[in-house]
Amino acid sequence: MKELAEKIMSAAADLRRLEAGWRPTEVDLEEAVGLDDWLQGIDCETKQHVLIGQSVGHPILGDQLITTSPVLWISQDRKIARTLSRWYRLRKPAALVTAHQTSADRAKPEDPGPLRG
């Protein structure tokens, strides 16, 4: 329980600072986990927004496909995210393919558009 309370307090402090205009620096993000081929999803059980992607340097899960804890904030440029547990450096987003795309269209991935959270 103590660990969860600490995560909530840390996340709340970061959200207050973000609301006041602060943005994390390179130093703040030195230990942030990288997330490649990521996309935004919704946890089926909790209905909360999460990120799904290939982690790079996760301190517990290592480098593998993960689903993050609930997303609390994503930068406008979609390069940084704060979840309940930690900061993430958002790297390359997943290339999405729609049913109406031809095989030629699939060769050139499109920008998935703005995230809303």
Image: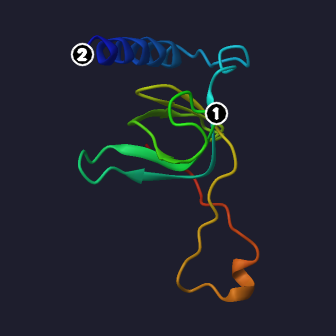
Relative to residue 16, is residue 70 depicted above or below?
A: below
Give the quarter of the image for residue 35: top right
Work out whether residue 56 or residue 98 is closer to the camera in this orientation and state it: 56
Rounded to the nearest angstrom, the CA distance separating label 1 from label 2 is: 25 Å
Disc 2 crowd rating (10 Å Cα; few below 14, some 14-19, many 20+) is few
Label ID, residue 57 = 1
Considering the image in quadrants, where does the C terminus appear?
A: top left
Question: Is 11 positioned to the left or the right of 63 in the image?
Answer: left
Q: Nearer the viewer, residue 22 or 79?
A: 79
SS state under label 2? loop
Q: Is residue 102 left or right of residue 72?
A: right
Q: Residue at x 38, y 45 (%)?
A: 49
- Whether residue 116 is visible to the viewer of this picture, yes or no, is no
Per the image, the residue denoted by label 2 is 1
Can residue 68 be seen here? The reply is yes
Residue type, numbered disc 1: Gly
- The picture quadrant where one finds residue 48 is top left
Q: Say what amino acid the circle numbered 2 marks.
A: Met
